Amino acid sequence: MKPVKLGKESIDDSRLAADKNACRKFGPCGAGDLAVYLNGYFLDRHYYIPYRSISRIYKRVAMSRGGFSGKGIFASIPYLVVEYDGGLEKQCTFKHENQVDDMISYIRKTRPDIKTISHDAEVRLALRQKERESKKIKNLSGEAVKTIEELEKQRNYLLDNESISRELSLSSRRKRAFLTNSSSYGWVALAITLLGAASLVYGIWSFASGNGNFGIYFALFGMAAIFFFSGVSVLPTAKNNRKSVMTRADRALENMEKYISGYPDFYLPARYAHPAVLARMIRTIEEGRAVSMDEALDTVKNDLKKINSDVTVEQDEYDEIVSIKPMFLNFDYS
């Protein structure tokens, strides 16, 4: 089907069809050479927005009360947000957060002119960076400088193949959530999924019979999507069960062990090998809280132990924490 244009700019039909067919797919959305392709309620890649109309593409996450700690019935609900035409916005729901991360990473590499964080996040990040700069020690020791240089090299090594670190993080988060969720959540998830199905059926019936208006249809189909994504993420499936979750985590760990074996004397064990861990270690040394790698890692561990669901942090630090804390929790910080 021909995708529907969003916004003022358009692409001629022949080029549009070729671009959509060849686009890189990320869940229900996609990124071509000319445009991004976004999902509707029922159809994947149903809309398109040319890159020349886009100012920002970024991730937004709706998190339930227990989501931060991996406890609670609702999983996080990830969205891809596209800002275009000077203020318009299109939000797309994804089932898997890693698909949003992969698409944003792809956009960041192929379209560096497009910002990949929200305006508010950009302002907070600038303030956060200024705050971090103020904490840095001006005259570090030679040992500290040498340690930072080596940690930077190891961090860049992980960033060269970022997908391995990302999979290690995602599989660790999934494993942590599976181990901490109560078995009773499955029954609640089933009830939520049935509510989603009921909302969908009633919405279709209302639309077909003409009993309602756009607001009612929007609310019903919206609730159906939220209930489905929240409930199905907890229900046992072919990919959401103990064996598959543990197998995925073990495979990710094996892949990381194999990858870091290519770097002589890589410091971190594979279970903690993530660019964000190394970045936090570097910051502890820059702030004068550590000098050696051992001291830096111990400081990072202590910082992570102090952070729980009652602690409020900035968005950039939140992203770091949820990426790496499950990796430490799964191995009890050993």
Image (cartoon, helix red, strand yellow):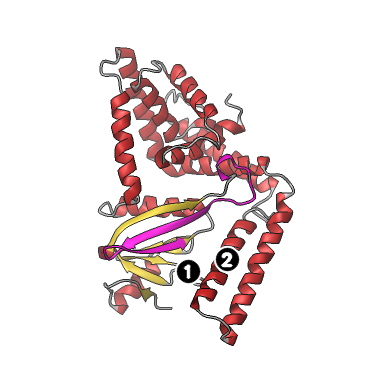
How far apart are the alpha carbons under marks 1 and 2? 19 Å
Tag 2, which secondary structure?
A: helix
Residue 232: x and y in percent read 64, 58
Q: Is residue 46 left or right of residue 16?
A: right
Location of residue 88 with respect to 246 vertically, above or below: below
Q: Residue at x 65, y 44 (%)?
A: 178
Q: Is residue 201 left or right of residue 161?
A: right
Q: In which quarter of the image is residue 45?
A: bottom left
Residue 332: x and y in percent read 61, 27
Q: Residue at x 48, y 64 (%)?
A: 28
Q: Residue at x 53, y 34 (%)?
A: 325
Q: Nearer the viewer, residue 159 or 230?
A: 230
Badge 2 is on which residue? 223
Q: Does the magenta stretch include residue 83?
A: yes
The label shown at residue 202 is: none
Q: Residue at x 57, y 26 (%)?
A: 333
Which numbered disc, 1 or 2, marks the residue closer to the eye?
2
Residue 147: x and y in percent read 36, 19
Q: Quadrant of residue 36?
A: bottom left
Badge 1 is on which residue? 44
Residue 212: x and y in percent read 55, 81
Compare marks 1 and 2 and give the one earlier in the sequence. Answer: 1
Residue kind at label 2, given as amino acid type: Met
**10 Å crowding of disc 1: few (<14), some (14-19), many (20+):** some
Tag 1, which secondary structure?
A: loop
The quadrant in which the C terminus is found is: top right
| Part of the protein shown in magenta | 67-92
User: So how many labels did they put on this image?
Assistant: 2
Q: In which quarter of the image is residue 53?
A: bottom left
